[in-house]
Amino acid sequence: MQGKGLGTLVAMTLDDILHRADWCGQLQQAWYEHIPLSEKMGVRILQYTGQKFITTMPETGNQNPHHTLFAGSLFSLATLTGWGLIWLLLRERQLGGTIILADAHIRYSKPITGKPGAIADLGSLSGDLDRLARGCKARVQLEVELFGNDKSGAVFEGVYMVLPADPDGPLEEGGCGV
């Protein structure tokens, strides 16, 4: 996935998102309500194409004393981006589940400066979400590429567990929102 950059996929507002802008709005709102750090960091959804999920955050407030992006902010952005792609994929497949980050690591190839961005691509995803339809937990692994000013600087690899949820529960808990 390296070197693809944010390019022309970036939307200016949620209304400009190419695929399921309504779901992206719900997802961003759920993050802000249930993961307050995401709002404090300024995490925003930039694009969802059905294949790629792109997020950003402001550079200001997410820098370290060296004027590069703080590793903790980048790790959080990558975690949320991977989590968000899985959440959207569950919606696409009409599955519910509680998504939990089980294991992760990040490799930095260089310090990241400039406008931060993260891209999760379905092409990097492996696992069996069909297990959820049978009431079993599922394990999903994926990569998120991190950028600054469209230049790749790190790759996050996350392993997420998706636990079957009560289908009548709220969306943010993996239910159908009924």
Image (spheres, helix red, strand yellow):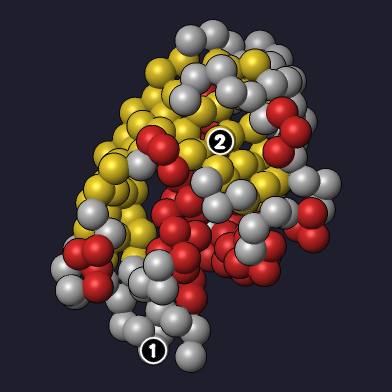
Indicate the position of residue 57 as horizontal and vertical percent values: 69, 39
Can I make out residue 120 in this image? yes
Pick the residue in front: 99 or 20.
20
Indicate the position of residue 156 as horizontal and vertical percent values: 42, 29
Q: Which mark is residue 1?
A: none
Up the image or down, 132 lies above or below 86; here it is below
Up the image or down, 83 lies above or below 136; here it is above
Q: What amino acid is at disc 1?
A: Asp
Q: Residue at x 40, y 25 (%)?
A: 106
Residue underneath mark 1:
168
> Quadrant of residue 158 in the image?
top left
Q: Residue at x 47, y 65 (%)?
A: 92
Disc 1 is placed on an element classified as: loop
Quick check: 171 left or right of 139? right
Quick check: 162 left or right of 178? left
Distance of mark 1 from mark 2, alpha carbons? 31 Å
In contact (CB < 8 Å): disc 1 and disc 2: no
Indicate the position of residue 84 as horizontal and vertical percent values: 50, 53
Quick check: 83 left or right of 132? right
Q: Residue at x 70, y 54 (%)?
A: 18
Q: Residue at x 79, y 60 (%)?
A: 15
Q: Residues within 10 Å of mark 2 (few under 14, many from 20)?
A: many
Pick the residue in front: 17 or 76.
17
Q: What amino acid is at disc 2?
A: Ile
Residue reaching furthest to the top? 110
Q: Disc 1 or disc 2, which is closer to the eye?
A: 2
Q: Residues within 10 Å of mark 1 (few under 14, many from 20)?
A: few
The tag earlier along the polypeptide, 1 or 2, is: 2
Up the image or down, 94 lies above or below 61; here it is below
> Quadrant of residue 128 in the image?
bottom left
Q: Which mark is residue 119?
A: 2
